[in-house]
Image (cartoon, grey):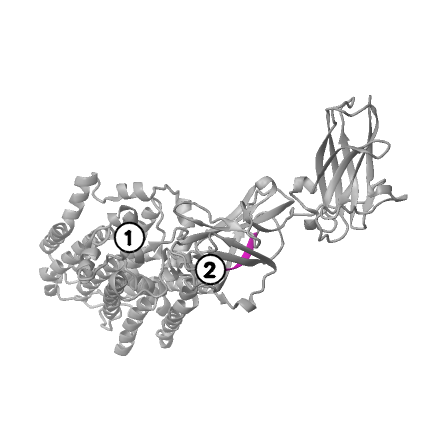
């Protein structure tokens, strides 16, 4: 449908036209069931700890229907990749030829060396892990890459063949057909069309400017060749661009696509900032641009690439020097052609593809290394030259071979080390081996899922920290609906602090595929909002819901009581630096665990019945508290009778004492409302702590000794 097609609907159609007959005989009516999109997918987010699968996969899809069609199309893509690799080998045979006419040769007349260099060039392409990944995918980049590689090889033949007669219009016609097919594969084919015209100009100029110009190509050949390329390209691909103009008044069809997927306008500095990711993804970024290799691998690849670039620069200087010397001593009629010109065309094509990608990146999201693959054999030729040229002759094979061996090892490891674990199902834990620090045993829905408990990687965090929550739950019955799991963090006054939503197993195990009775171990990272109010108690809420309707599964306690908000636990959110205070003169100690270190009472000039006074008390933890105490604030008369009170856990229950750190000072502010029946007289304001479950108060001591009734007197008022 329109939604699933998205950007691909704007792409030129050749790859799909060639692929369609291959699967036309299959019944793909199960497409929607097989290719169900993961609503929580995280494309382009390599640092996400889950949901890297765009599609919700069945446990083991059979090779039939849509699944079989995908395998067939992947094989088709592999064949296109093979074409690219063969082109790389053929380019290497012309690039590293031993002919003395090919100046500045790396091979020095050694035929076996040139053959090995050609093989190394093919291997450098074939063992690029990213190339293997894209080539094994259903992706129209593969057609464009193969056609661009064919075009570059044809041009290499024309450059290195010194016999002008071999530059027949048949070869030019083949180049025109390839260019036309490329233009109907991807918009990069339009760039290829321009590159081919420039290359023909270079070939004609090269032949005309060599000594013995009678051997050069005439102007007539250039004019006819350019006309033939234009004619064939327009004949093959022109209808597509005419269609775009008629439908959208835009020959490329980009504008309606950009309106659909989103347009952005990046500055040059922003584009440059994305080039680092482009380099990484040329070698090894998998999945939907969200699976990375280890950092040291990228560091090694960057080092080699920069060494190759340095070596290429040295080779260029060496070539210029030898060309000058050769021109001084070469006999009349010598034609200097071959590798330098081919390498120059490879550099030009690479620069054109890179420039096109930068322009694309500045318009919409798409800074991906695979978009450089139309120039992959050109890039490989430049890298191989840079790695081989500056080293001693005896090491010219060993240096690039060592790098390619490393690529081969990486390519062999990638599926098992990086890709497969990303899409693996979560661990199933035997019931008798489940170890949870925080048991819960909530049940969700109509006895569909039970949350046994959870573990936290730590119980004290600060704003901006990432908390790892490991849940243990199981299906109690088979489910036909795929429910989403949610983890919510709530701070003071229900301040939202963070959340994770996912299908179980970080997206890899939808509830419809869970086996009743299997206990699943499922870990998630939740980042605390940097703007969170501190210090605070953070409440952890866990539940399940239907993504399509948004309806939550009702939660119940082990006793069968329905819970509106399924809070399963809490942890401490601390300030970046704990606040401490010395014991105040006239202060109080409570049970040897806490101290009342300061207080302040705001009263009207004349307290009367019905008025409100505000009291702030500051408490300091002297020990690591494990109990949640209730603070009481009472207005008492001279007989000890309580006329009004305000009892609750600290800060209205938002920051229980059980979360306080040793030495931490917590200020609690609350009010006392004078009752309307309050008679005139002298009253005291007293405070303290007690256990809500038993009513037992903590003993209160002042510097003078124990305080009766375990209540600290912090103020007095007179009511006239």
Find residue 364 and report its horizontal and vertical position in percent: 34, 45
Q: What residue sits right under mark 2 in the picture?
A: 475
**Magenta stretch: helix, strand or loop mostly:** strand
Left or right of 390? Residue 564 is right
The span from disc 1 to disc 2 (Cα, nearest Å) is 55 Å
User: What residue lies at 26% left-to-right and 44% top-to-bottom?
Assistant: 254
- Give the quadrant of the C terminus: top right
> How many residues crowd mark 2 within 10 Å: few (<14), some (14–19), many (20+)?
many
Q: Position of residue 444 (x, y in %)?
A: 49, 53
Q: Quadrant of residue 392?
A: bottom left
The label shown at residue 144 is none
Does the rendering let one see residue 321?
no
Locate residue 469, reporting x and y percent. Answer: 55, 56
Q: Is residue 95 magenta?
A: no
- Quick one: 396 or 693, which is closer to the camera? 693
Q: Earlier in the sequence, mark 1 or mark 2?
A: 1
- Looking at the rendering, the stretch of residues picked out in magenta corresponds to 466-476
Q: Which residue is mark 1?
A: 352
């Amino acid at each position: 449908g329109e939604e699933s097609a998205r950007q691909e609907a704007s792409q030129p159609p050749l790859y799909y036209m060639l692929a369609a007959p291959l699967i036309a005989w299959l019944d793909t009516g199960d497409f929607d069931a097989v290719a169900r999109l993961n609503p929580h997918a995280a494309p382009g987010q390599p640092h996400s700890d889950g949901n890297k699968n765009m599609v919700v996969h069945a446990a083991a899809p059979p090779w039939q229907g849509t699944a079989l069609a995908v395998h067939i199309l992947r094989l088709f893509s592999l064949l296109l990749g093979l074409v690219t690799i063969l082109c790389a080998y053929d380019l290497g045979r012309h690039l590293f030829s031993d002919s003395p006419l090919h100046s500045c040769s790396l091979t020095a007349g050694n035929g076996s060396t040139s053959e090995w260099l050609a093989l190394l060039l093919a291997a450098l392409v074939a063992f690029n892990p990213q190339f293997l990944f894209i080539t094994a995918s259903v992706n129209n980049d593969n057609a464009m890459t193969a056609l661009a590689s064919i075009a570059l090889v044809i041009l290499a033949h024309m450059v290195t063949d010194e016999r002008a007669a071999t530059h027949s219009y048949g070869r030019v016609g083949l180049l025109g057909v390839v260019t036309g097919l490329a233009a109907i594969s991807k918009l990069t084919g339009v760039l290829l069309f321009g590159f081919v015209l420039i290359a023909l100009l270079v070939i004609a100029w090269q032949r005309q400017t060599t000594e013995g110009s009678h051997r050069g190509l005439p102007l007539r050949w250039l004019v006819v060749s350019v006309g033939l390329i234009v004619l064939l390209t327009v004949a093959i691909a022109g209808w597509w661009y005419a269609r775009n103009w008629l439908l959208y008044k835009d020959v490329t069809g980009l504008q309606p696509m950009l309106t659909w997927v989103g347009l952005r306008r990046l500055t040059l500095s922003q584009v440059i900032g994305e080039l680092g990711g482009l380099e990484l993804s040329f070698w090894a970024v998998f999945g939907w641009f969200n699976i990375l290799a280890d950092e040291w691998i990228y560091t090694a690849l960057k080092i080699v690439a920069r060494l190759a670039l340095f070596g290429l620069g040295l080779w260029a200087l060496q070539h210029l020097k030898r060309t000058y010397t050769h021109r001084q001593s070469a006999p009349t009629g010598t034609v200097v052609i071959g590798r330098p010109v081919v390498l120059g065309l490879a550099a030009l094509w690479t620069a054109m593809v890179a420039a096109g990608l930068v322009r694309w990146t500045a318009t919409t999201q798409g800074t991906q290394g695979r978009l450089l693959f139309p120039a992959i054999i050109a890039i490989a030729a430049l890298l191989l030259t840079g790695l081989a040229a500056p080293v001693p002759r005896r090491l010219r094979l060993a240096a690039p071979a060592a790098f390619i061996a490393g690529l081969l090892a990486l390519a062999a490891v990638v599926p098992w080390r990086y890709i497969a674990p990303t899409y693996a199902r979560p661990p199933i834990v035997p019931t008798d081996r489940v170890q949870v620090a925080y048991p819960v045993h909530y049940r969700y829905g109509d006895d569909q899922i039970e949350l046994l408990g959870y573990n936290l990687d730590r119980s004290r965090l600060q704003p901006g920290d990432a908390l790892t929550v490991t849940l243990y739950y199981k299906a109690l019955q088979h489910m036909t609906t795929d429910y989403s799991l949610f983890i919510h963090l709530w701070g003071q006054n229900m301040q939202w602090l963070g959340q994770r939503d996912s299908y179980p197993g970080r997206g890899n195990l939808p509830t419809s595929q869970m086996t009743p009775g299997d206990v699943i171990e499922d870990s998630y990272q939740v980042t605390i909002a940097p703007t969170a109010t501190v210090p605070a108690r953070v409440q952890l809420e866990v539940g399940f819901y239907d993504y399509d309707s948004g309806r939550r599964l009702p939660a119940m306690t082990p006793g069968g009581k329905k819970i509106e908000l399924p809070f399963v636990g809490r942890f401490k959110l601390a300030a970046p630096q704990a606040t401490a205070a010395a014991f105040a003169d006239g202060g109080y100690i409570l049970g040897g665990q806490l101290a009342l270190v300061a207080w302040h009472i705001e009263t009207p000039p004349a307290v009367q019945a019905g008025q409100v006074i505000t009291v702030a008390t500051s408490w300091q933890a002297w020990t690591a508290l494990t109990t949640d105490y209730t603070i009481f604030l009472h207005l008492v008369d001279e007989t000890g009778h309580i006329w009004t009170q305000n009892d609750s856990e600290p800060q209205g229950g938002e920051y229980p004492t059980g979360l306080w750190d040793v030495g931490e000072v917590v200020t609690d502010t609350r009010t006392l409302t004078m009752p309307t029946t309050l008679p005139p007289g002298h009253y005291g304001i007293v405070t303290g702590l007690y256990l809500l479950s038993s009513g037992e108060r903590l003993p209160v001591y002042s510097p003078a000794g124990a305080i009766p009734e375990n209540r600290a007197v912090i103020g007095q008022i007179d009511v006239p």
